[in-house]
Amino acid sequence: MNVGGDPERDDSGLPPVDIEIPDDARELDRDVQAYQRELRALRRRRRASRLRGPLTRDQMALPLVAGCLILALITSTLLIMFAADQTGVPQAPRPPATQRSPAKSGPTAGQIGGPLPATAVVIGGKSVPLRKITASQPSVLALVPADCRCASTLRQLSTQAARAHVPFYLVGTGGAMKQLPQLAAQAGQGPGQVAEDTGNVLGDTYQQHGLTAVFVRPGGSVTFVARQLARPLSDQLRAALRQLTPA
């Protein structure tokens, strides 16, 4: 410095600087602490910039955020759908399907009002469907057991059927066929009225017990079954015969 207290001229061309040197170095503690704080802040900024660098490099931040948002939207939609199914939320109504009305069930073979069983009998050496016999006209089928001593009962039943204009058939199986032609002749019936039920289908279906008569309407529906027939015939049988033909 010069005599006047002003800084002397610096030959290096730098501007003059007023430098004050304290007498005690402890007076510089606050400046040192401030400098250290600035250094720490600078290091923190550098570390943060290093962490954000991969995300912001080449504009990767926006696509990554958009992808996360789309994934979150899809996940929330799926969760809502599954939750709605489990909580019983009504679904959209389906178009009504064509419903078929169930077939009305009627009496089966073996029951009153039901049809004759789908079987065949042998008449004159030929197999004839049983339902064909009664397809267009009523009939009375007399199921004759073996060793039947029922000639008079068959004769009376045949007479009642003839008066009602109802065809009358004698049906037998197994050993009963030996006496059937003779019983038919005694009842006034020809060979064409004798039928053989080789499988005893009628006897099993209608629970034959003794001389049994099955009354059949045109079309094959059974209206009445009489078992253990004997003379004299009851009024119930006569009424059953009258029901087979229209008044």
Image: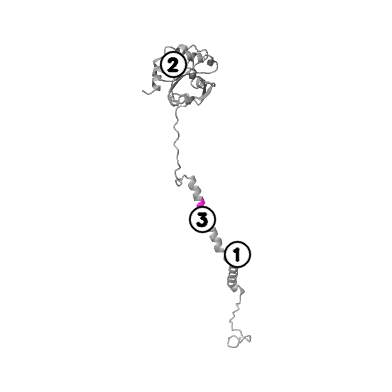
Which residue is at a point 38% across and 20% down the rendered structure image?
Answer: 242
Q: Which residue is mark 2?
A: 158
**Residue numbers of the magenta segment:** 74-78
Q: Amino acid at mark 2?
A: Ser
Classify mark 3: helix, strand or loop. Answer: helix
Q: Does the magenta portion include 77?
A: yes
* Disc 2 residue crowd, few under 14, some 14–19, many 20+, Cα 10 Å: many
Q: Which residue is mark 1?
A: 54
**Would residue 211 be found to the left or right of residue 37 on screen?**
left
Q: Amino acid at mark 1?
A: Pro
Q: Nearer the viewer, mark 1 or mark 2?
A: 2
As displayed, is residue 177 above or below residue 38? above
Rendering coords of residue 91 (x, y %): 46, 46
Q: Nearer the viewer, mark 2 or mark 3?
A: 2
How far is disc 3 from disc 1 in space, using C-alphas?
A: 26 Å
Would you identify the image quadrant in which residue 37 lies? bottom right
Which residue is at a point 53% across and 24% down the rendered structure image?
Answer: 127
How far is disc 2 from disc 3 in space, using C-alphas?
A: 91 Å
Which is more N-terminal, label 1 or label 3?
Answer: 1
